[in-house]
Image (cartoon, grey):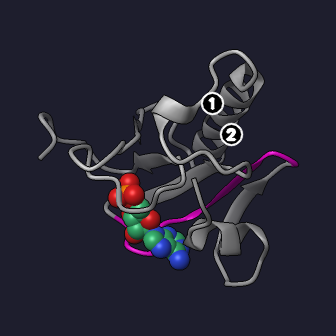
Amino acid sequence: MGETIFSKIIRKEIPAAVVYETDSVLAFKDINPQAPVHILIIPKKIIDKIHNFDTRSDSELLAELFQAAQQIAEEHGLSKNGYRLVINNGNDGGQEVEHLHLHLLGGRKMNWPPG
Ligand code: AMP
């Protein structure tokens, strides 16, 4: 597991439109939005894929990622109508940046199945 562009965003070495930040979690607007609201929620700790998420020692972190999603959705007026949380994981999952992240997408009706 190594650094990605998200490490630079965490260290504020490159700009991002940050909407939420705690000691362990950062969230910022996706640079190529796929919905009226498209925010990436990431752990500051480098975890590349779900497989390398330690379900015991990182369990609090998982709760913090969901807490971020709840607050961000609330702040963007998405709680009532809903939204989608997506994790693209690995090559077949369509993951481009190898730093675990949740896509929070909302503000329009989502399609199913995804492409
Ligand atoms: P994924 O395909 O799940 O790995 O998603 C990576 C996401 O990161 C894509 O939706 C990109 O648009 C987004 N992205 C890449 N670089 C940046 C950046 N510098 N700032 C914000 N979003 C980015």
Q: Distance between the residues labelled 1 and 2?
A: 5 Å
Asked if residue 91 shows in the view, the reply is yes
Q: In which quarter of the image is residue 7?
A: bottom right
Q: Residue placed at 41% from the left, 38% from the top?
A: 83
Q: Do the residues labelled 1 and 2 touch (CB within 8 Å)?
A: yes
Q: Which amino acid does label 2 sit on?
A: Ala
Of all residues shown, which one is farthest toward the top?
56
- Residue 55 pos. (x, y %): 63, 18
Q: What element carries label 1?
A: helix
Viewer-proximal residue, 102 or 111?
A: 102
Ligand 1 within 8 Å, label 2 CB: no
What residue span does the magenta drawing correspond to? 23-33
**Label annotation for residue 44:** none
Label 1 Cα crowd, 10 Å radius (few <14 / some 14-19 / many 20+): some
Q: Return the residue at label 1.
A: 66
Identify the residue position indicated by label 2 in the image: 68
Residue 86 pos. (x, y %): 38, 40
Residue 86 higher or lower than 10, as above or below = above
Percent of width and height locating residue 96: 36, 61
The residue lying toward the viewer, choosing from 94 and 18, is 94
Amino acid type assigned to the residue bearing label 1 in the image? Phe
In the rendered structure, does residue 17 fall within the stretch colored magenta?
A: no
